[in-house]
Amino acid sequence: MLLSIPAALDAAQLQAVRARLAAAGDAWVDGRVSAGYQGVPVKNNQQVDERSEVAAQCQAIILGALERHPLFISAVLPNEVYPPMFNRYGVGMSFGAHVDGSVRIQPRTGRKLRTDVSATLFLNDPSDYDGGELVVHDTYGAHRVKLAAGDMVIYPATSLHEVTPITRGERLAAFFWIQSLVRDDAQRALLFDLDTSIQRLNRTDADGDARRSLVGIYHNLMRQWSET
C-alpha cells in the first residue's frame, strides 16, 4: 500500500525540525555511511549523523507527532518505529534504484527492527527544488511522489524505489522504517480499508449493530494476523 499522509508535522513542528537541521553543521555527513552494499554505488546525498544530538532532538519531534496521528496509526499499525534519519540532496545528487534492507539495528539501543514499511517525510516545499522525486516501482508501474512540506508518504519496504537527480535547489527530508504489528502488506491494506469504512459509518451514525459487527471483525482479524 502506497499512501500519502497529509500534515504529519504541523507548521510549528516543521519549523522546529528545519531550524535544528539548518544549524546542524558538522553533523551532516556523507549519506553512504548508512548504505548497504547495493546502495553505496547509487547513493549520492548527505545525511545527519544519527547518533548526533540534533538528530535526537528532531527524532523526538517527529515521533511525538506520529504517536498522535490517527491516519498514520491506522495505515501502518506500528509496533516499533526506527528513529527518523535526515537527508538532503543538492544539485546533481540522487539515489538510484534500490530496495531497503530487511533489518535495521538501532544505533543507540542495538535493537533489531524488521522493516515492513518505508516512510519519507518531506521537510521543504516542492517549489524549493526541481527533480528530487521519490519514485516507487511496483506491479502497477512507477509512482512519482513529491509532496508539500510536512506531508509524508508510506510504502512497502519491499518496493524498488529511487530519488531522481536534483537540477535546482535543495531537497530536505526525513526517512525511516516501521515494524508493523501486521507484517503482510495486503493484510494491512485490508485492515486500513475496514477501519476507514468504520470511521465513515461512525460519522454518519449508521446502523449501530452493523458497526459493532464490523468493529468485531476488525479486531478478530487483528488477533489472527498480529505478531505481538
Image (cartoon, rainbow, N blue to C red):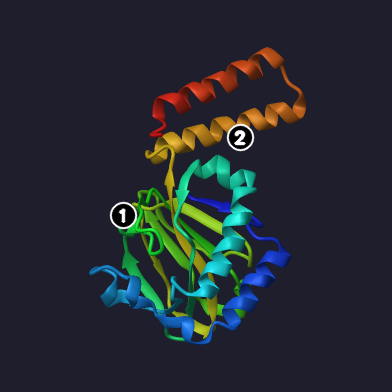
In the figure, 19 relative to 106: above or below?
below
Q: Which residue is mark 1?
A: 103
Q: Is 223 positioned to the left or the right of 64 in the image? A: left
Contact flag, marks 2 and 1 (Cβ < 8 Å): no
Q: Is residue 223 left or right of residue 56?
A: left
Residue in the image at 57% along x and 47% along y: 72
| Residue at 52% from the left image edge and 20% from the top image edge | 217
* Percent coordinates x, y for residue 29 in the rendering: 41, 82
Question: In the image, is residue 40 above or below residue 144?
Answer: below
Task: Identify the secondary structure beneath mark 2.
Answer: helix
Q: Tag 1, which secondary structure? A: strand
Q: Which residue is mark 2?
A: 196
Which residue is drawn at the image coordinates 37% and 52% (left, top)?
Answer: 115
Mark 2 crowd level (few <14, some 14–19, many ≥20, 10 Å Cα)? some
Amino acid type for the residue under numbered disc 2? Thr
**Along the viewing direction, whichever of 16 and 52 lies nearer the viewer:** 52
The image shows residue 157 at horizontal and vertical percentages of 38, 53
Which residue of the protein is positioned furthest toward the left in this rendering? 37
| Nearer to us in this view, 7 or 50 | 50
From the viewer's perspective, is 49 left or right of 99?
right
Between 216 and 112, the one lying in front of the other is 112
Look at the image and tell me in which quarter the C terminus lies: top left
The one nearer the camera, 80 or 71, is 80
**How far apart in space, not on screen, are marks 2 and 1 (Cα)?**
30 Å
Q: Earlier in the sequence, mark 2 or mark 1?
A: 1
Residue 101, by quadrant, is bottom left
Q: Which callout, 2 or 1, points to the residue nearer the camera? A: 1
Query: From this viewpoint, is residue 127 visible?
Result: no
What amino acid is labelled 1 in the image? Val
At a point 44% along the width and 38% down the height, the residue shown is 181
Asked if one can make out residue 215 in the rendered structure from this viewpoint, the answer is: yes
